[in-house]
């Protein structure tokens, strides 16, 4: 990476507050994932290595609203503000930027993240508050960009950005993707406010805290139609097993981390790499548990056994639906039978499985919903997550559906917890009821209750979170019936 000595300028990175929960489902906040932005930690580490002062604001985790984030930034008077954008957070980020621009007219506002990787032009055209957009991965680009900004240079030579010049938006050629992930500075966990205490994964999704997230590879060559892979593209790049092992050890030694959640798209893509990492963990007797995500077609029984020995506690599988027809429509390159085999093998070796499901994809019918329920009933899964199909910009299906009944004004609702689109034959209210029914199918299983009970007894934090959730759920249900909404929880805002 190009090293530049700065004039000790200051950049504050911000994960903005955004609607994580759908209106009517507020009680869900007690059980959802509160993990930090790894992207911002990587960026902060890179600019720090290049000589900048930097810090991170994690708005939701610090319970800061738009005004509080803006006030903090205005007080701090940074030279640059770097905001990470999911689609759902764009409007909040724009509001923070507007407030900061009023008081800090010389401060440059730089945006990046998954939303920018797919929607840079639309976002820059619409939100004049953002000065510069960094498209795709940011570690090298941000350092090059800040160096040019420090010297008041023209930005045309900085690859991978979009900026404003004489009232026009200029896009520079794409920056090359980072080939050697091992060359990147280790994410700046030390800059996270209140790390690790305040960062919690979803309920029942970790055996014991403190927990940290890590990412050990980037890129995915598949093209599942609902998925936005625009940030890292199709080419898979990975950290060496040694770097992954050393980072785990660093987190254990420096922050007392007991469990790691790998958030890679394709953690098990390479059999050799996975086995080598397991060997390192076993040989060095690293006493940590970990979980990862995997495609159902990448798990093999012998590798699973080794993973179990190396402390793997849970694997999340993108199972999506119990209907092969729907899987085909999603171009998921998986079949229900293969999913079932993967979950069965995982259970056989004693690793927990988490099923990630989606509901309301174009082509969803009452029949496919019943198939999903039956599938959920028979799978030896430990936990599950059900998201409401959302056509994220950057996903292939977004382009197909754009112009039907999606409008970009739905950006604020694109958090997987709102139906911003409904398949033929359903109203969103009907989908909402079916959504609750699918979840009930899982939570009513005796094996689920049994597993959760055991975990809660061992780690009471899960029970505390669950009791807040159940309390909130029943209150919301009663409110819905009393308000004549017949049990529908979602509220149109
Ligand atoms: C871990 C993860 C989470 C975590 C942590 C989120 C976080 N703040 O980072 C949690 C669980 C909280 C989460 C939540 C959600 N997630 Co999520 N998540 C991921 C996942 C799997 C990995 C993210 C990651 O750590 N990547 C590694 C880091 C290094 O990359 P990065 O953050 O993108 O940052 C790099 C670049 O984007 C860029 N960059 C980022 N920000 C900035 C800022 C500046 C200033 C600059 C210069 C550059 C820059 O540089 C960084 C370094 O190279 C991605 C999939 C993926 N492959 O990325 C989905 C992904 C980001 N999630 C997604 C979504 C939709 C969500 C949700 C909104 C909905 C949902 N159902 O999942 C929710 C949020 C709502 C809620 N209820 O909380 C989508 C985003 C699509 C979009 N257009 O918005 C993704 C891409 C999944 C997908 N393929 O569709 N998620
Ligand atoms: S869902 Fe998984 S396998 Fe499919 S494109 Fe996205 S990251 Fe790749």
Image (cartoon, rainbow, N blue to C red):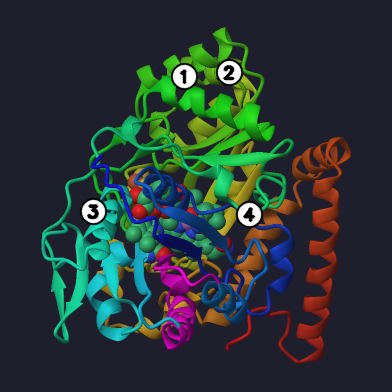
Q: CA distance from mark 4 to mark 2?
A: 30 Å
Q: Nearer the viewer, mark 3 or mark 2?
A: 3
Residues marked 3 and 4 touching at CB (< 8 Å): no
Task: Give the label, 1 or 3, closer to the camera.
Answer: 3
Separation (CA) of disc 1 from disc 2: 8 Å
Name the residue carrying label 1.
277
Q: Position of residue 122 (x, y in %)?
A: 26, 78
Residue ID for mark 2 = 310
- C-alpha span from label 1 to label 3: 33 Å
Label 1: how many Cα within 10 Å (few below 14, some 14–19, many 20+): many
Q: Is residue 375 visible?
A: no
Main SS of the magenta segment?
helix
Disc 1 or disc 4, which is closer to the eye? 4
- Tell me residue 474's x, y (percent): 83, 72
Tell me the residue that label 3 is attached to: 144
Q: Which residues are magenta?
A: 76-103
Q: Earlier in the sequence, mark 1 or mark 3?
A: 3
Identify the mark nearer the N-term, 3 or 2.
3
Q: Say if mark 1 contacts mark 2, CB within 8 Å.
A: yes
Which part of the image, by quadrant, shows the C terminus? bottom right
Q: Residue 171 sits in which quadrant? A: bottom left
């Amino acid at each position: 990476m190009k090293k530049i000595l700065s004039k000790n300028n200051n950049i504050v990175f911000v994960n903005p507050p955004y609607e994580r929960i759908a209106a009517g489902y507020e009680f869900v906040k007690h059980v959802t994932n509160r993990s930090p932005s790894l992207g911002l930690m990587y960026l902060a580490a890179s600019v720090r290595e290049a000589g900048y002062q930097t810090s991170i604001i994690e708005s939701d985790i610090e319970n800061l609203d738009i005004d509080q984030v803006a006030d903090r930034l205005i007080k701090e008077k940074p030279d640059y503000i770097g905001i990470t954008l999911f689609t759902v957070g764009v409007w909040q980020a724009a509001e923070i930027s507007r407030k900061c621009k009023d008081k800090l007219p010389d401060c440059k506002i730089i945006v990046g993240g998954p939303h920018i990787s797919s929607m840079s032009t639309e976002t820059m055209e619409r939100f004049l508050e953002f000065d510069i957009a960094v498209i795709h991965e940011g570690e090298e680009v941000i350092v090059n960009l800040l160096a040019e900004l420090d010297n008041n240079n023209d930005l045309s030579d900085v690859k991978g950005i979009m900026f404003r010049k004489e009232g026009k938006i200029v896009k520079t050629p794409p920056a090359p993707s980072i080939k050697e992930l091992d060359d990147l500075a280790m994410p700046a966990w030390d800059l996270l406010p209140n790390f690790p205490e305040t960062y919690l994964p979803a309920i029942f999704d970790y055996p014991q805290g403190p927990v940290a997230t890590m990412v050990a590879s980037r890129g995915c060559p598949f093209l599942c139609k609902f998925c936005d892979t625009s940030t890292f593209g199709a080419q898979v790049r990975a950290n060496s097993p040694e770097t992954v092992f050393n980072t785990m050890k660093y987190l254990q030694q420096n922050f007392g981390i007991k469990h790691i959640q790998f958030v890679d798209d394709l953690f098990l893509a390479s059999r050799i790499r996975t086995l080598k990492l397991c060997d390192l963990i076993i040989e060095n007797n690293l006493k940590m548990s970990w979980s990862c995500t995997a495609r159902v077609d990448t798990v093999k029984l012998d590798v699973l056994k080794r993973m179990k020995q190396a402390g793997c506690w849970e694997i999340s599988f993108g199972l999506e639906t119990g209907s092969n027809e729907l899987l085909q429509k999603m171009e998921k390159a998986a079949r229900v039978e293969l999913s079932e085999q993967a979950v069965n093998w995982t259970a056989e070796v004693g690793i927990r499985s988490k099923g990630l499901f989606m509901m309301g994809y174009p082509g969803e019918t009452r029949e496919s919903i019943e198939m999903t329920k039956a599938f959920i009933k028979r799978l030896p899964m430990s936990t599950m997550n059900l998201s409401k199909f959302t056509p994220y910009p950057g996903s292939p299906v977004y382009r197909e559906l754009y112009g039907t009944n999606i409008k970009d004004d739905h950006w604020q609702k694109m958090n997987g917890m709102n139906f911003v689109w409904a398949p033929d034959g359903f109203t969103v209210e009907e989908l909402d009821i079916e959504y609750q029914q699918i979840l009930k199918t899982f939570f009513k299983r005796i094996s689920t209750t049994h597993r959760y009970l055991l975990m809660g007894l061992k780690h009471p934090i899960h029970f505390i979170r669950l009791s807040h959730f159940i309390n909130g759920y029943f209150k919301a249900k009663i409110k819905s019936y009393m308000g004549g909404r017949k049990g529908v929880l979602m509220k149109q805002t």
